[in-house]
Image (cartoon, coloured by chain):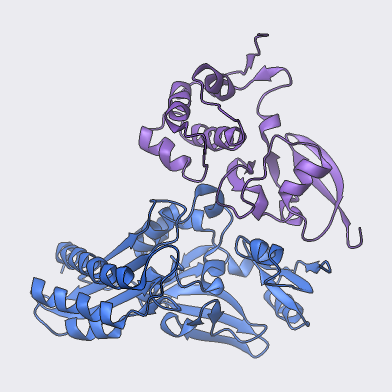
Chain colours: A blue, B purple
């Protein structure tokens, strides 16, 4: 294999220029990239190491919401005080991500751009309507998280574009969030099925005003379960309604059989985990101050 | 080899100047260039923890780090946790508790445990298990490993112990 050249830009505009070169590949934590290069699945001519770009680091509040720099390491999501307050679900999911050895290297931007069907961090972002901030030759643009994933290891990023940050809108009132994940081990394992859910309840605490359900590992990409959401929104929340929504999510899943689990098992577990996540989200919503 | 560039690494408190290629991993530099073979190569995909080293005091899989990315960081390997001829309290405890069988996972286990104890000198059993989720032992010796680490709680900040000749 020809050895690639390594470039270490310190600004976004330098990085954009570097990525315009033929065979240029962006690199952050490199925990997905290194094995892919060693297997020959990716053969970059130029590696553009983004880690020196200050604009892509840190978590802060802006007028749009909470801005999480794409270079934020998974380990930093775990104990960031702003994430803990604004999106505790993301910290929860980060705590179950791989292992300390990987969390200290892997970045949130890398996890999203690698776009694995099981991308753990995508689910909490999908259920809060997060937005990806992107920079490329054509300038800046925003992509809704629900439009970001396009296929296995494929995103909506155009060639040469860089994911710079994820923006999470300010937390909504009377909203509960929960997630559920199923794998063989608690750690280090890719999930068979992952589910995240949010429910916003009406002021009287009985109706579902707004629902978001996201599924992982049961389709080519992490995705929203629109049918489940539509079943819930505007309705009186009962355990029967939650069962119907869970059924809806299962019917929307497009799982495959692989060495981890069969298609049928994944679909059934999508139903079970969606029900669990929705019940918990509803319970938590009721505890929020109106 | 073409494409090699000189890089400076700080390993176990010493500075090294090494020529390495752009896709060479930290693991390769440690083992092949510096002869620090205490760090093991297991799965090469970041799942087994045998290659664990400390980067600025935090555990990292050295098979998942490009050498160029480790420049400027404080790297600690198993060779660097106690002065030559002496054992770190964790190493001593692993011997005392029979927490070593084939030994391949041991350097990574000890470094993960050291990072935990440096941050939290009196961890709970759950803390220890969580700190070790990325270190696999295929001789099935987890119980003794947990016991060894627990026995060090609150004591690893002290000086390392001299090895007894056996």
Residue A28 picture quarter: bottom right
B18 w.r.t. A277: above or below: above
Residue A53 picture quarter: bottom right
Query: Which residue is outermost to the right?
Result: B2
Figure quadrant of the N terminus of chain A:
bottom right
Is residue A169 at least partly visible in the picture? no
Give residue B23's position: percent from left, percent from top: 77, 60
Question: Residue at position x 56%, y 59% from top?
Answer: A106
Residue toward you, A182 or B154: A182
Give residue B147's position: percent from left, percent from top: 43, 25
A71 w.r.t. A142: above or below: above
Residue toward you, B62 or A203: B62
Give residue B47's position: percent from left, percent from top: 55, 51
Give residue B122's position: percent from left, percent from top: 42, 28
Q: Image check: B56 left or right of B90?
A: right
A137 w.r.t. A265: above or below: below
Question: Residue at position x 47%, y 53% from top?
Answer: A188
């Amino acid at each position: 294999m020809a050895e690639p050249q390594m470039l270490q830009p310190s600004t976004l505009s330098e990085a954009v220029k570097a990525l315009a070169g033929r065979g240029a590949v962006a690199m952050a934590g490199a925990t997905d990239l290194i094995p892919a290069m060693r297997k020959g699945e990716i053969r970059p001519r130029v590696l553009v190491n983004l880690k020196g770009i200050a604009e892509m680091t840190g978590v802060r509040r802006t007028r749009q919401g909470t801005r999480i720099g794409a270079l934020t390491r998974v380990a930093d999501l775990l104990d960031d005080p702003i994430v803990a307050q604004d999106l505790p679900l993301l910290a929860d999911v980060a705590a179950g991500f791989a292992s300390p050895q990987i969390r200290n290297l892997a970045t949130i931007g890398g996890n999203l751009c690698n776009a694995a069907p099981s991308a753990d961090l995508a689910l909490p972002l999908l259920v809060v309507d997060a937005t990806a901030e992107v920079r490329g030759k054509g300038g800046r643009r925003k992509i809704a998280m629900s439009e970001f994933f396009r296929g296995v290891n494929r995103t909506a990023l155009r060639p040469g574009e860089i994911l710079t940050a994820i923006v999470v809108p300010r937390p909504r009132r009377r909203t509960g969030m929960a997630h559920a994940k199923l794998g063989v081990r608690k750690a280090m394992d890719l999930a068979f099925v992952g589910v995240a859910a949010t429910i916003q309840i009406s002021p009287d605490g009985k109706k579902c005003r707004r629902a978001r359900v996201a599924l992982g590992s049961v389709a080519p990409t992490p995705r929203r379960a629109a049918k489940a959401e539509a079943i819930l929104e505007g309705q009186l929340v009962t355990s029967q309604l939650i069962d119907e929504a869970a059924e809806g999510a299962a019917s929307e899943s497009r799982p495959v059989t692989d060495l981890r689990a069969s298609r049928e098992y994944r679909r059934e577990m999508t139903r079970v985990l969606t029900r669990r996540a929705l019940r918990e989200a509803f319970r938590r919503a009721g505890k929020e101050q109106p | 080899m073409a494409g090699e560039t000189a890089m400076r690494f700080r390993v176990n408190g010493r500075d090294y100047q090494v020529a390495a290629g752009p896709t060479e991993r930290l693991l390769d530099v440690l083992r092949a260039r510096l002869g620090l073979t205490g760090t093991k190569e297991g799965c090469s995909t970041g799942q087994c923890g045998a290659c664990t080293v400390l980067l600025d005091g935090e555990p990292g899989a050295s098979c998942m780090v490009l050498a160029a990315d480790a420049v400027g960081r404080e790297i600690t390997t198993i060779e660097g946790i106690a002065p030559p001829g002496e054992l770190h309290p964790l190493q001593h405890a692993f011997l005392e508790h029979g927490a070593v069988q084939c030994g391949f996972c041991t350097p990574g286990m000890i470094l993960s445990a050291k990072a935990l104890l440096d941050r939290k000198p009196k961890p709970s059993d759950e803390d220890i298990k969580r700190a070790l989720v990325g270190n696999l032992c295929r001789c099935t010796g987890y119980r003794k490993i947990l016991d060894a680490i627990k026995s060090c709680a609150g004591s690893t900040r002290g000086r390392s112990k001299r090895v007894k000749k056996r």
